[in-house]
Amino acid sequence: DADVTQTPRNRITKTGKRIMLECSQTKGHDRMYWYRQDPGLGLRLIYYSFDVKDINKGEISDGYSVSRQAQAKFSLSLESAIPNQTALYFCATSDRRGGSRETQYFGPGTRLLVL
Amino acid sequence: QKEVEQNSGPLSVPEGAIASLNCTYSDRVSQSFFWYRQYSGKSPELIMSIYSNGDKEDGRFTAQLNKASQYVSLLIRDSQPSDSATYLCAVNKMYSYDKVIFGPGTSLSVIP
């Protein structure tokens, strides 16, 4: 079984709808991240959480919210989806014991299309 | 100036050649440097990390770091078609609470 899982893997929704993307991990890592990837723009950080009570905005948090329900679960919500949010979304985890050398482990991604 | 910059490519090399991928970063306190490989439609995976000036070799891959020039590179020897992917450079600063910054990636195509 994969260490970092994301659901759903693909999602089509309409403008204005609220949707939630979920991420779960079995790696025992305390840090979790949500990124979006658009062609030519690389990975851009939306939100990150260093533990259950520590949630921080990334560079493109507008229009998104998150919830860290447990150490192993980190959900991303789009309150009112817009076509501009069509992208590939990745969840990632890392272990703080790695310090500045920590490696990020990525989930398989969720491909979101907003019509 | 972006914090981490890479040539977007695409970079095309013939099979068996050396592929050279470059990355520059703007923050001098950066301490840890990573290369992730991402196949089309897949998630990034770590292939190399480097923390000290000089070269680090792992199989066909060599990472090179020059902190004075704020430059890190990845060399792929004996390139194979299976190396065709996007390569993401990532940089982390000194303190563990600093987040990793990813570059935009370089697309590599190895021509049989």
Image (tube, coloured by chain):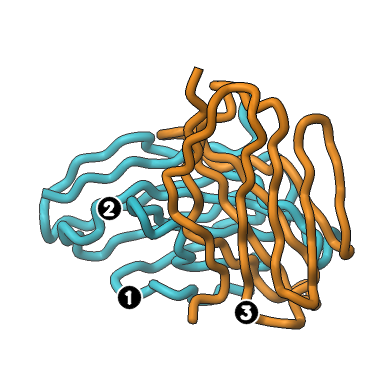
Residue B66, given in percent of the width and then of the height, sits at 79, 67
* Res. A10 mark: none
* Res. A62 mark: 1
Same chain, labels 3 and 1:
no
Which of the two discs, 3 and 1, sits closer to the camera? 3
> Is residue A107 in view?
no
Q: Residue at x 57, y 51 (%)?
A: B88
Q: Residue at x 38, y 41 (%)?
A: A110
Q: Is residue B104 above or below residue A13?
A: below
Residue B47, given in percent of the width and then of the height, sits at 71, 40
The quarter of the picture where residue A107 lies is top right
Disc 2 and disc 1: Cα gap in Å? 15 Å
For disc 2, the marked residue is A19
In terms of depth relative to the viewer, which is nearer, A19 or B76? B76
Q: Secondary structure at mark 2?
A: strand
Q: Secondary structure at mark 3?
A: loop
Residue B57, given in percent of the width and then of the height, sits at 86, 41
Who's cyan, chain-wise? A
Question: Is disc 2 surrounded by few (<14), some (14 to 19) or many (20+) residues within 10 Å?
Answer: some
Q: Quadrant of the N terminus of chain A?
A: top right
Amino acid at dot 1:
Asp
Same chain, labels 2 and 1:
yes
What color does chain B have in the rendering? orange
Left or right: A73 as drawn, with respect to B34: left
For disc 3, the marked residue is B26
User: Mark 1 or mark 2, which is nearer the start of the sequence?
Assistant: 2
